[in-house]
Image (cartoon, grey):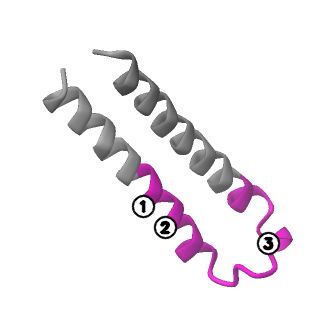
Amino acid sequence: MNFLFKALIAKLEGEIEVSKANIKVYERQPVGIGEHIDIVETIEKEVEKIAHAHDKIEAINTYCK
């Protein structure tokens, strides 16, 4: 796999880690997130980001090697 795909995978993995960190914050301190009234919906959006990045990584690993 060339360096461009490796860089893209690293970027996507970083996006996954950011979303995971956000979810942990929402779980541990939901009162500190004033503008997010529906915490479950907010967490779902983060899960969607994780799924989207994961799907891209899988596509790269499947089709771009």
Q: Are marks 1 and 2 in contact (CB under 8 Å)?
A: yes
Which amino acid type corresponds to the residue marked 3 in the rendered image?
A: Ile
Q: Is residue 61 left or right of residue 11?
A: left
Q: Are marks 3 and 2 in contact (CB under 8 Å)?
A: no
- Residues packed near mark 1 inside 10 Å, few (<14), some (14 to 19) or many (20 plus): few
Which amino acid type corresponds to the residue marked 2 in the rendered image?
A: Glu
Disc 1 secondary structure class:
helix
Q: Is residue 24 left or right of residue 64?
A: right
Which amino acid type corresponds to the residue marked 1 in the rendered image?
A: Glu
Work out whether mark 3 precedes mark 2 in sequence or the reverse, and give the earlier one. 3
Residue 22 is inside the magenta segment: no
Quarter of the image that includes the N terminus: top left
Q: Which mark is residue 61?
A: none
Give how far apart the Cα atoms at labels 1 and 2 are. Answer: 6 Å
Residue 38 is inside the magenta segment: yes
Q: Which mark is residue 33?
A: 3
Residue at figure coordinates x 85%, y 69% from the top left: 32
Q: Is residue 64 left or right of residue 28?
A: left
Read off the magenta span: 25-50
Q: Predominant secondary structure in magenta?
A: helix
Q: Which residue is mark 2?
A: 44
Q: Which mark is residue 48?
A: 1
Residue 38, how many percent across, how many down?
62, 82
24 or 14: which is nearer to us?
14
19 or 61: which is nearer to us?
61
- Residues packed near mark 3 inside 10 Å, few (<14), some (14 to 19) or many (20 plus): few
